[in-house]
Image (cartoon, rainbow, N blue to C red):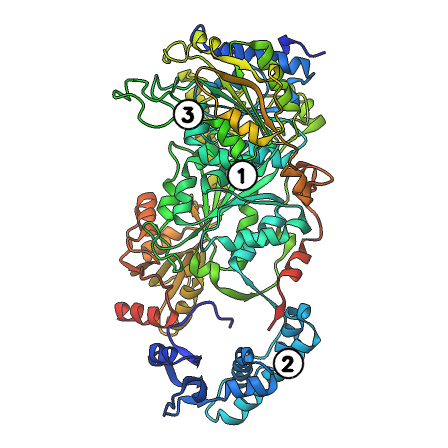
């Protein structure tokens, strides 16, 4: 039996009260409930406070570079599509530095589960604006307030026909855990954007700010399979912030479309065979 | 003697428009011939060097289509050279199989018409072809790298199209189904190298390829491969820079860039083949060394090498190294106290394949401890640098083959080159050795520089009267590397950076002028 103790990793170096702690707890509980052992899956992360996440879990880990979580995860998933691959990133990491990779990972629909710790601020570098920061928010680096518009990752994902799009809140562990399980069980690419208060640097989007605004889409006769209403839902932000599964579809995955790995994963292929000489004869013709 | 370089002169020019004649007539050899069709060009050229062949008329009469002009011209050239018609017929039957018997037959007729016309009319053609001894393959360097990669067990190739490296990706994609390879065209070069690193971590041999600015984008990922000790092979096909430079021309100006690429200090190996054959065996060695030492290994080529076709002996697959270094399943499970980055005598830690046992494979782009977890402990840092860099580097140095000596064993004049200049420099030694003690020292394995214990090339350089470093770049990058690493200063440098490769005839003249 898998238990929470199996996922006891190193001691986190996050600020007390950080939203990351509840994300960590939700994740551990989700894995226990899914009966997945630490060696049964791979977590890929980048750089940022979220990037440290896999060190605190005990699991197969590739903690790569800032913004490059998804390409590494894509390579892993294509090499071994039978192992669950979870990508963990922050808003600066995934929506800023790695924005191009996000667009194309959604297009490919590789079965990666992307969990974005979205605290609307750069925590690791101490308080600069992120792509999801509220317009006008003043930081040390944005003395005139944030001048750029706020990136809406949910709308972006729905617009790209992302296979699974959900939003969770670090202040509700049971609900977040449920979304994590749904995302992991979904067949294609899953984006789970997690609203995460940063108690040190983000004084706007606090626990109370979110608690007053979030509501559960599943309680409102909502059909996440209808893309048009999903797009309308994705635009809601402000007085009411919808959380839950916003959109999902049954797109064929990238892995399913690659004939080479139809029968077995790439890592199961023989790499040295006797017939290499044929490669040359088929490629070239003999001459002179 | 097989041709191994280009010349600046032309023996036969097939001119399908007037510009071809205006631009290239001055490059014609004495006794050379320009084939043209006075009706197509609406021009009559006077002189012994001009040979009118009714290309269009023969195409329409025998090939039933003006598109057959090329085939008629090919027939004319082969006729002038006295090459048997069967050679062409075999190729046509092979290449046009899908188009059907009629097209094949029309091509043969058009070819024969051009052939017969040239044999009859070219009164000054005196070419003689060395008789065919045995079959050779016709192959380019990009294909040779691709075959070398497949035969070395490469299962994953991710890249972004960029001239002149694209040919490798195209070759791999063409072979994907047959050999079970995933070839992914990434959204950019940053993604390309990170995907290859991910696939390598997950347990398959992987590779990427790029050129110039594409490699600039990969540099961050190169450093990631080094820190996580993830094996990766990178084919870097050089073209002239800076920036977009001369995208379809050639240069050898990214040697020091590749050598210094990547933030931080880590081991890497750079190979620079001079022919498809060398590219084939070096690609295999690149995979083996990258897997064995868990390091990035480069195959450095250039546009000239990438886009030229060679006839060469069939490759010998028995020379291939096929060693598996990764551990998985039961054998991984049985390792007591497995740690991904454990300290070892060799600096190399066993690399398990994640998900195949209960052992966890943890790695980090941050400095990490033996298990792979992030740390800032100064003692661990020092031990990790010793493991990753010093211990491995000492062993890697032993694996580097010495350069090739071609020509006189006690030369007065030494030509030094690396990579794509192999063919042209060899021919120059052949040309100049009639009355001079001259030799070529050519490096295929350019970094780390070969140790002199196996072959003391420095001693030869020291005793020569004149030493030339000849490179397709402006600043003499390899000569600077040799000086920095060995202290040897060349007496002469010859650089070329107009986007063209060295030509055997003109380079031989320049060297001869300097030698006096």
The residue positioned 63% from the left and 70% from the top of the image is B135
SS category of the residue bearing label 3: helix
Q: Chain of mark 1?
A: B
Residue B147: x %, y % from top left: 60, 53
Q: Which residue is mark 1?
A: B196
Quarter of the C terminus of chain B within the rendering: bottom left
Tell me if A253 is positioned left or right of A105 in this view: right
Tell me if B497 is positioned left or right of A220 in this view: left
**Label 1 environment density (alpha carbons within 10 Å; few <14, some 14–19, many ≥20):** many
Discs 3 and 2 share one subunit: no
Asked if labels 2 and 1 touch by Cβ distance under 8 angstroms, the answer is no
Q: Chain of mark 3?
A: A
Between the residue at mark 3 and the residue at mark 1, the CA separation in whole angstroms equals 23 Å
Residue B302: x %, y % from top left: 43, 56
The residue positioned 67% from the left and 21% from the top of the image is B358
Which sits in the foreground, A272 or B349? A272
Q: Which residue is mark 2?
A: B106
Q: Which mark is residue A241?
A: none
Between the residue at mark 3 and the residue at mark 2, the CA separation in whole angstroms equals 63 Å
Q: Which residue is mark 3?
A: A92
Discs 1 and 2 share one subunit: yes
Quarter of the rendering containing residue B362: top right
SS category of the residue bearing label 1: helix
Say which of marks 1 and 2 sits in front: 2
Asked if labels 1 and 3 touch by Cβ distance under 8 angstroms, the answer is no
Residue A41: x %, y % from top left: 63, 24
Quarter of the rendering containing residue A165: top right
**Label 3 environment density (alpha carbons within 10 Å; few <14, some 14–19, many ≥20):** many
Quarter of the rendering containing residue A39: top right
**Does label 1 or label 2 sit earlier along the sequence?**
2
């Amino acid at each position: 039996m898998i238990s929470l103790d199996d996922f006891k990793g190193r001691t986190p170096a996050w600020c007390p009260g950080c939203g990351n702690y509840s994300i960590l707890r939700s994740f551990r509980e989700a894995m226990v409930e899914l009966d997945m052992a630490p060696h049964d899956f791979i977590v890929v992360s980048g750089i940022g406070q979220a990037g440290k996440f896999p060190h605190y879990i005990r699991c197969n880990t590739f903690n790569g570079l800032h913004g490059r979580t998804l390409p590494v995860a894509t390579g892993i998933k294509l090499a071994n599509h039978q192992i669950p691959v979870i990508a963990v990133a922050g808003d600066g990491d995934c929506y800023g530095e790695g924005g191009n990779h996000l667009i194309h990972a959604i297009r490919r629909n590789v079965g990666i589960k992307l969990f974005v710790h979205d605290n609307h601020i750069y925590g690791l570098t101490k308080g600069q604006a992120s792509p999801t920061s509220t317009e006008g928010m003043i930081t040390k680096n944005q003395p005139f307030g944030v001048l750029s518009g706020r990136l809406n990752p949910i709308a972006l994902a729905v617009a790209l026909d992302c296979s699974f799009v959900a939003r969770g809140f670090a202040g509700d562990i049971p609900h977040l855990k449920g979304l994590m399980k749904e995302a992991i069980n979904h067949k294609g690419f899953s984006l789970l954007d997690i609203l995460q208060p940063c108690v040190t640097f983000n004084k706007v989007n606090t626990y109370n700010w979110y608690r007053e605004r979030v509501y559960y889409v599943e309680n409102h006769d909502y059909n996440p399979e209808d893309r048009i209403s999903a797009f309308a839902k994705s635009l809601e932000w402000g007085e009411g912030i919808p959380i839950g599964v916003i959109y999902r579809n049954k797109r064929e995955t990238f892995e399913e479309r690659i004939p080479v790995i139809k029968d077995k994963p790439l890592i199961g292929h023989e790499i040295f065979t006797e017939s290499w000489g044929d490669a040359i004869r088929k490629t070239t013709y003999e001459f002179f | 003697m097989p041709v191994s370089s280009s010349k600046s002169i032309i023996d036969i020019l097939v001119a399908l428009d007037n510009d071809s004649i205006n631009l290239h007539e001055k490059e014609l050899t004495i006794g050379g011939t320009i084939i043209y069709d006075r009706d197509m060009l609406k021009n009559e050229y006077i002189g012994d060097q001009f040979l009118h062949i009714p290309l269009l008329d023969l195409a329409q009469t025998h090939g039933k289509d003006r598109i057959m002009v090329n085939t008629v011209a090919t027939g004319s050239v082969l006729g002038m050279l006295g090459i048997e018609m069967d050679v062409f017929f075999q190729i046509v039957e092979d290449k046009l199989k899908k188009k059907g018997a009629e097209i094949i037959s029309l091509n043969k007729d058009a070819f024969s018409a051009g052939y017969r016309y040239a044999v009859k009319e070219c009164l000054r053609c005196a070419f003689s072809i060395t008789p065919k001894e045995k079959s050779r393959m016709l192959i380019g360097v990009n294909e040779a790298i691709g075959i070398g990669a497949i035969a070395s067990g490469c299962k994953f190739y991710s890249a972004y199209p960029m001239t002149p490296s694209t040919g490798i990706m195209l070759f791999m994609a063409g072979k994907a189904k047959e050999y079970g390879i995933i070839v992914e065209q990434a959204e950019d070069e940053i993604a390309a190298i990170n995907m290859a690193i991910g696939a390598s971590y997950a347990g398959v041999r992987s590779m990427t390829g790029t050129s110039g600015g594409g490699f600039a984008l990969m540099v961050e990922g190169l450093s990631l491969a080094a820190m996580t000790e993830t094996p990766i092979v990178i084919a870097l096909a050089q073209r002239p820079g800076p920036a977009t430079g001369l995208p379809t021309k050639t240069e050898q100006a990214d040697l020091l860039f590749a050598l210094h690429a990547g933030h931080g200090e880590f081991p890497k190996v750079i190979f620079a083949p001079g022919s498809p054959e060398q590219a084939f065996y070096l690609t295999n060695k690149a995979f083996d060394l990258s897997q064995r030492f868990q390091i990035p290994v480069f195959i450095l080529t250039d546009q000239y090498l990438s886009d030229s076709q060679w006839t060469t002996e069939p490759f010998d697959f028995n020379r291939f190294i096929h060693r598996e270094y990764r551990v998985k399943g039961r054998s991984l499970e049985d390792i007591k106290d497995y740690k991904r980055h454990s300290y070892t005598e060799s600096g190399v830690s066993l690399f398990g394949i994640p998900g195949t046992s209960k052992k966890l494979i943890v790695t980090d782009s941050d400095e990490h401890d033996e298990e792979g977890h992030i740390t800032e402990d100064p003692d661990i840092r020092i031990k990790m640098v010793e493991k990753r860099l010093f211990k491995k580097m000492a062993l890697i140095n032993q694996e580097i083959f010495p350069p090739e000596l071609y020509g006189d064993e006690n030369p007065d004049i030494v030509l030094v080159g690396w990579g794509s200049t192999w063919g042209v420099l060899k021919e120059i030694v052949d040309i100049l050795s009639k009355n001079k003690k001259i030799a070529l020292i050519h490096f295929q394995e350019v970094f780390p520089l070969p140790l002199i214990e196996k072959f003391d090339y420095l001693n030869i350089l020291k005793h020569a009267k004149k030493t030339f470093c000849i490179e397709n770049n402006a600043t003499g990058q390899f000569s600077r590397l040799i000086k920095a690493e060995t202290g040897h200063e060349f007496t002469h440098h010859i650089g070329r950076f107009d986007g063209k490769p060295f030509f055997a005839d003109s380079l031989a003249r320049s060297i001869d002028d300097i030698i006096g």
